[in-house]
Image: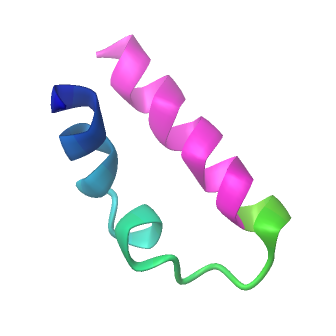
Amino acid sequence: RHLIENFLEFKRIAMRSDKTDTTFAAMIYLAAAVIHSS
């Protein structure tokens, strides 16, 4: 649950504001890298 809450801190992921699936997936990978590095 904590991991999901960390992902939802990224507004672009929570709002799903990206226009393409590729951009959305890239944002998820970026958020995962940031969360993993901290």
Which secondary structure class fits the magenta region best? helix
Q: Residue at position x 73%, y 85% from top?
A: 19
Asked if residue 3 lies left or right of residue 22, the reply is left
Q: Position of residue 22 (x, y in %)?
A: 83, 61
Q: Residue at position x 67%, y 63% from top?
A: 24
Q: Is residue 37 magenta?
A: yes
Vertical placement of residue 21 versus 20, above or below: above
Q: Is residue 28 magenta?
A: yes
Position of the N terminus by quadrant: top left
Vertical placement of residue 2 versus 31, above or below: above
Q: Nearer the viewer, residue 35 or 14?
A: 14
Q: Position of residue 30 (x, y in %)?
A: 57, 40
- List the single residue furthest toward the top: 37
The image quarter in which residue 34 lies: top left
Q: Residue at position x 60%, y 53% from top?
A: 27
Asked if residue 4 lies left or right of residue 20, the reply is left
Vertical placement of residue 1 versus 8, above or below: above
The stretch of residues the image draws in magenta is 24-38
Q: Nearer the viewer, residue 23 or 4?
A: 4
The image quarter in which residue 6 lies: top left
Q: Residue at position x 57%, y 46% from top?
A: 28
Q: Position of residue 23 (x, y in %)?
A: 75, 65
Q: Position of residue 12 (x, y in %)?
A: 44, 70
Vertical placement of residue 17 versus 34, above or below: below
